[in-house]
Amino acid sequence: MNKQKLPANSKILQLDPFIDNKGLLRVGGRLSNANIFPNEMKPLIIPKHHIATLLVRHYHEKVAHQGRHLTEGALRSAGYWLIGGKGLISSVIHKCIKCRKLRGKEEFPKMADLPFDRLDPAPPFSYVGIDVFGPWTITTRRTRGGQAQGKRWAVMFTCLVVRAVHIEVIEEMSSGCFINALRRFCALRGEVKILRSDCGTNFVGALSELDVNVINIGDRPIKNYLSDKNINWIFNAPHSSHMGGSWERMIGIARNILNSLFMETKQLTHEVLTTFMAEVTSIMNARPLVPIDMDPDNSFLLTPSTLLTLKSEHTVRSFSIEDFCDKDLLKSQWRCVQQLANSFWKRWRTQYLPTLQMRHKWKQECRNLTEGDIVLMRDVSLHRNDWPIGVIEQTYASSDGRVREVQVRLGKNRKLFTRPANEVVFVMCK
């Protein structure tokens, strides 16, 4: 067979290729004296073709769906040299359904813009995030045989604008106790426009007082109270604690402070726990919202407690009054309060608000999940091989067009689950 000279820019020139006696193109190379199998010494050269894809799939299955390195080694040991093999193997592994089930990552859409209730300069506790934490074992009363014990939980109300907190202690994780805590909170802090929470059972039960869900405790006075106040309740998607990060982080801070306070007492009672919660609230509301300025002339700290005493009816109306200067501090008390409020909101807008600008994670665009996609639903209580597989029945796009919440249909019983996008693993299109 006649030899032909390869062009200088040929991709296989450095392989010193030759055609064997069967008319197959093989690698010449420099390993003719090596003590290895002939197929490894002079492997077949396979160009980019469907045959190459079939070979990659075959040997990828033979190595039990391992990574590119092992798959490429199996191909080379079998006597095949793929042109552009690394890219082809990576592409096949990326599309492999079993590999996605074994090692596929959850979907992480680009981080959403902040909702308006995090950015609206409104009176404190107009927009509130709620969560419950605990329990703690307390001594309820002394008995002849010792001491009777009970449990207590705490409800944390977090202002989404000025980041102030308010904590109420409850005796049970029930809708009735939570509604009472909400009534106490509204009586002390004023009316609320929006409540945000996760889909915890106590919150769903509480909201059922408004005939939104099936649970009905029958507390009509409380139902009328919430309806008259025009409180809008917004639930995050199930299993999406990151969507309530602004108040989930506050619970972490409260736990750290409580751990320190609990070291000071040997016997925890309801009264002691309530006192501790008040001290935790005071400490958290005195924290600076922005890094402390080293300028000695600027000694005013931007803290949530700055505005907590301004939550009154006349204060709400006074936000639209003309600006005042520092000389107004010497005038009537209402002008003093207004100047402090103006000073707070000015610094809130110029110092605190810019800190919310950056996206610290989930910065890249990714493919939107669509109806009909086959996905794995993450379940932390199961091994990954046992995660249920389902079909996306419906998608919920945010205002920016990105899908961050989906409804998944599982199995033959066709049960529907609502999950955030980061709780599912994309497997394939239907």
Image (cartoon, rainbow, N blue to C red):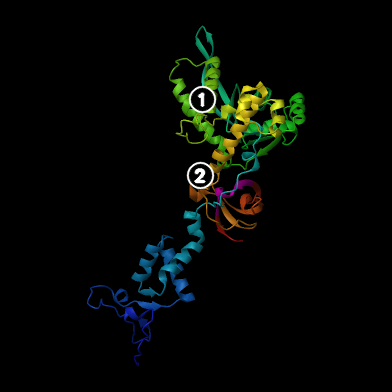
Q: Nearer the observer, disc 1 or disc 2?
A: 1
State whether residue 312 is above or below residue 116: above
Name, please, the residue furthest toward the top: 144
Dot 1 crowding, Cα within 10 Å, few <14, some 14–19, many 20+: some
**In the image, is residue 250 part of the stretch drawn in magenta?**
no
User: Whole-percent x and y of residue 326?
Assistant: 60, 29
Name the residue type under label 2: Leu
Q: Residue at x 38, y 83 (%)?
A: 24
User: Whole-percent x and y of residue 281?
Assistant: 55, 24
Residues under numbered marks 1 and 2 in contact, where contact means CB atoms less than 8 Å apart: no
Task: Place residue 229 in its image quadrant.
Answer: top right
Left or right of 200? Residue 61 is left
Name the residue type under label 1: Ile
Mark sitting earlier along the chain (1/2):
1
User: Whole-percent x and y of residue 428?
Assistant: 57, 60
Residue at which label 1 appears: 283
> Can residue 248 be seen?
yes
**In the image, is residue 423 part of the stretch drawn in magenta?**
yes
Closest to the observer, 30 or 299: 299
Q: Residue at x 62, y 32 (%)?
A: 342
Residue at which label 2 appears: 382
Q: Secondary structure at mark 1?
A: helix
Q: Principal SS element in the magenta part?
A: strand
Which residues fall within the magenta stretch?
Answer: 417-425
Name, please, the residue furthest toward the front: 327
Task: Place residue 140 in its image quadrant.
Answer: top right
Name, please, the residue furthest toward the bottom: 2
State whether residue 134 is above or below residue 213: above
State whether residue 147 is above or below residue 5: above
Left or right of 389? Residue 218 is right
Closest to the observer, 256 or 4: 256
